[in-house]
Amino acid sequence: MNKFFALLGFLIVSKVLFGQYTSEGELTSRFRGGIMWFNTGLRPADANKIRKYDRLIFDVTYNDWTGNQKLLQNEWSSIGLNTNIMFDIPLVSKNKIALGIGISHQFVSIRHDNHLIRDYELGTTSYVPQASKMESSKISFGGNSFSVPIELRFRNEGWKHLKFHVGGKIGYQATGYSRDVSYANGNREVAKRFGFPDLNELLYSMHVRTGFRNWALFLSYNFNTIFSNAASEQLNLVQAGLSISLY
């Protein structure tokens, strides 16, 4: 976690990496385009080619859930990361409206400090609050998923553009696990347990981004519940955070 925050701090401080080229098609600019912007492949870049944006996007998110449980009841350390590799497909001249499509990896961690009880015979997962919050016990739910995002993008002309993205994802929930960190006799013990009897493997969600140049606010809602059994705790993933486009 310390390495994660160190990386995030480096990206924020090094904002010189996150500029865009001018709309006039300049081949050199003090506004660097970020990682891989100068890579043109086997041939030189065409100065008249429409500039493309938001092809490598990181969403740094606070993760929560809604449904049977209320929003904003979990710990602030419920941090996640979405990595999106996208094609930016212009739909009009000067690329003011575009289609974005690609692949995405999502890491989610929700620090709730309660119990998710598995019943393999009934195929259910129950949410049981602790009788009392114990500072020495930290319990979280986490998982990894892969999906195909598609979004409609609106932006002003030029590198100083405002932007608005609206879209959704459909994908596969690859893993789900619970992580319990406790302290006993001065020793730190970590128990990580994979597998839920009714983890919903299909995921589909809607998201929006709105911001300026390489920065945007991000909000996402999963329409599918985390656990598929109707008798289980009904929880829908919600994410809010900051998007950083490097390319």
Image (cartoon, rainbow, N blue to C red):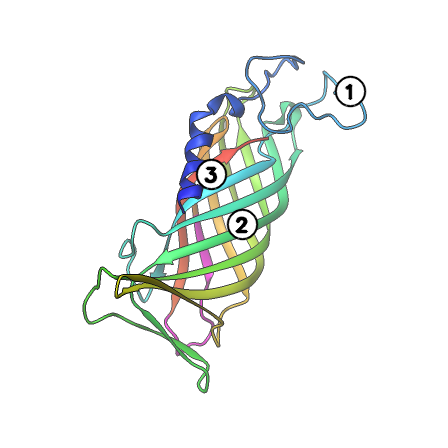
Relative to residue 100, is residue 228 drawn left or right?
left
Q: Helix, strand or loop at disc 2? A: strand
Is residue 143 highlighted in magenta?
A: no
Please tell me whether residue 221 belongs to the stretch shown in magenta: yes
Q: Tag count in the figure?
A: 3
* Label located before the other in sequence (2 or 3): 2
Q: Which residue matches tag 2?
A: 168
Camera-side mark, 1 or 3: 1
| Sequence-first disc among 1 and 2 | 1
| Residue at the (66%, 33%) spot, across then down | 91
For residue 209, the mark is 3
Nearer to us of marks 1 and 2 is 1
Front residue of 230 and 140: 140
Q: Residue furthest right?
A: 42
Q: Is residue 217 visible?
A: no
- Spot the residue most to the bottom: 121
Q: Which residues are magenta?
A: 220-233
Label 1 belongs to which residue? 44
Q: Is 183 left, or right, of 38 in this rendering?
A: left
**Image x and y of residue 205, in percent:** 50, 54
Distance in Å between CA atoms under marks 1 and 3: 32 Å
Q: Neighbour class for label 3 at 10 Å: few (<14), some, many (≥20)?
A: many
For the residues labelled 2 and 3, the Cα–Cα distance comes to 11 Å
Q: Estimate the x, y position of residue 176 in percent, counting from the top left.
A: 48, 65
